[in-house]
Image (cartoon, coloured by chain):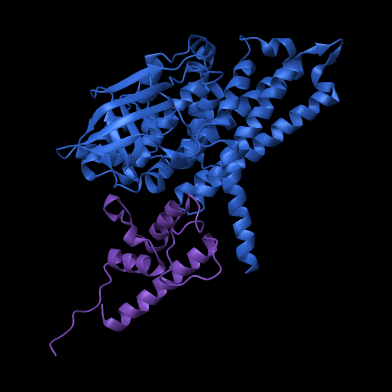
Chain colours: A blue, B purple
Amino acid sequence: MQYLLTEQQKARHGDFKTFVNQNVEPFAEKWDREQRLPESVIALLAKLGYLGCSLPTQNGGHGWDTVTFGLLNEALGRGSSSLNGVLTVQTMVSKALLKWGSVEQIRKWIPMLAQGEIIGAFALTEPGGGSDIHSLVTEFTDSRGDSLVLNGAKKWISCGQFASLFLVFGKLGDRSLACLVPRETPGLEVEPIHDLMGFRAAGLAKLTFNNVEVPPANVVGKPGFALSHIAPVGLHYGRISTACSALGLLRGCFEESVTWAATRKIGNQPLGDIGMIRSLIAEMGTDLEAGSFLCHSACRAADENLPEAFEKALMAKYFTSRAAVRAASDAVQIQGAAGCHASSSVSRFYRDAKIMEIIEGTTQIHEHLLGGIFLGQVRRSLQ
Amino acid sequence: MTNSSHAEEEKKVRETVTNFLLSSINIANLNDDDNLFASGIVNSLFAVQLMTFLEKIFVIELGMDDLDIENFKSVNATTAFVMRKKGWQKAEAGPS
């Protein structure tokens, strides 16, 4: 897949991998065990401009293309899915706000998000449901003045524990609405969620809104468009980010497995000489190559602003998240008891991979959408 | 823009929009005033795909101010929106 990249993209991917080798991989198990990311590593991402890398330079970002953004996610995903989650949600909030925010909102918030001076979180999922976003019960109501009043709860919000700015989705009457809620807003309570199976350091939280005042300046877009236009832009970049992160995790499984198979012996025979082990590695390596093409295709389509970019992101996320689960399971199998211990990266990969199948739309939601898209294409071609 | 060139551009826009819609949504026949957001015709990605298509093909940028269902509810509405966005207005009527 490397031949599809420009020299600059290859060079940056090399830089990303070096960064991850030095600053992420050696500490990822510790972060996972302690269930928290140190502020220093997030500050480092910010300092390097990684958190706003795909935002325009005039807004304080690097202006990198989506392919390069995908490569950064891939590299970070190889090191720590939890850490990559910061980039995922920062980009979801930033891209949605950049597209549909007012001039004043973009001027106020995007440079701070681009520079990593503040961390955003995408508050869509609720305690009562995640996949069916149209069943939101978080509610905006009119108050006496110009402001709205927000009541409700959000759950499983990545980076919620340390985010400074929340992009919150709810209903105003029968119309969907999105707004920005800064962390210090009176009435907002943040409750950490611990002991997840995977993504343990991603700072998930439950948010409760008790009569939170939302001034007009913090309403994003217009009533009625939050779920049709604003959330899909954020989710699109969330899927690209997660797809590429799962690809990085898949690469981790592949590299760990190949190294183990090449060095571990059964009697005098290297493990890799056993056909059944080769079968597992063959599937892993082929999935890695296939996933790379799907991710590249999704990123290129986003760079070219193609309408089919949304479908391609669905396909990439659907494929790589499932392939990552298979690869992580096989990687543990290849390492045996050693792969089951917390000291082994693949045991963390095994737990993190499953989360990839759930965030930014479950595998089943992806199948529902993609199945409908493919059937529709055939139906139309037969008309 | 003269009235005849306006009509020509409008026809091209209408055909382009109609062709995209027929290739994107599950409907056999599409009339110019059919409601695109009627239940079951489109999936949850349709609105942003239409937005992206319009931006790409007509070299326009949509933003917050364009979020109005009246702009996108039908072929006619979308065509009129693109014509306005491009600044392709009919010539002012002269004195009779």
Which quarter of the image is occupied by the N terminus of chain A? Answer: top right
Residue B16 vertical placement versus A10 (above, below): below
Say above or below: A348 vs A120: above
Residue sitting farthest toward the bottom: B96
Q: Is residue A35 shown left or right of residue B92? A: right
In the image, taking residue A340 as reference, residue B94 lies left or right, namely left
Residue at image position (26%, 53%) is B65
Picture residue at 68% right of the left edge, 27% below the top: A327
Q: Position of residue B52 (x, y in %)?
A: 42, 54
The structure residue drawn at horizontal position 87% and vertical position 11%, both measured from the top left corner, is A268
Q: Where is residue A373 in the image (x, y as percent from the top left)?
A: 58, 53
Q: In which quarter of the image is residue A342?
A: top right
Q: Is residue A111 visible?
A: no
The image quarter containing residue A123 is top left
Residue A148's spot in the image, x, y percent? Answer: 23, 37
Q: Quadrant of the C terminus of chain A?
A: bottom right
Total number of numbered discs in the rendering: 0
Q: Which residue is painted at 47% across and 26% down in the image?
A: A84
A376 versus A261 height, above or below: below
Quadrant hosting residue A167: top left
**Is residue A279 shown left or right of residue A125?**
right
